[in-house]
Image: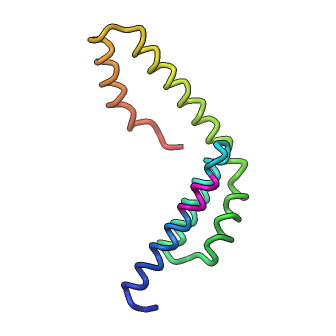
Amino acid sequence: MDNPVFSFFYTLADLIIANMMTFLCCLPVVTIGAALAANHYVTQSIIYKTGGSLIRTYFKKFIEYFKHATIVWLVQIFVLAVLGFNMYLVLVYFNDTFRNILIVLMALFAPTFPKL
């Protein structure tokens, strides 16, 4: 267990399991926020070696973060829908030059939006 190679592969296996649980919990779209929040917590506990049982911790945090993370996720979905509709309007209703300028501006400013 003290071998660095075995330690690396155990950590890698834990990360793969955590991401597979997150993928399964993200299948119903409403639970994506709670799944990502629980995955973030479990990933930190794997990296810093502070956690216990991976699956038990994941679902405990999933339930704990469900209400708050779902509200935040629904707000993000709404903002993404508005931005997607704006992109649709730009692509359909503007001429090529103005459309290209707007697409470049959106690409430049997209990384500045805060992560919720």
Residue 77 placement: quadrant = top right
Percent position of residue 101, x then y = 29, 18
- Determine the residue positioned at 67% across, 46% down: 28
- Determine the residue positioned at 43% across, 78% down: 9
Pick the front one: 21 or 51: 21
Q: How is the image coloured?
A: rainbow
- Determine the residue positioned at 57% across, 66% down: 42
Question: Is residue 44 placed above or below 96 in the rendered structure?
Answer: below
Extreme residue in the bottom direction: 2
Q: Is residue 80 magenta?
A: no
Range drawn in magenta: 19-25
Pick the front one: 10 or 111: 10
Residue 25 lies left or right of residue 80; in this view the side is right
Question: Is residue 36 placed above or below 11 in the rendered structure?
Answer: above
Residue 14 lies left or right of residue 57; in this view the side is left
Percent position of residue 91, x then y = 40, 16
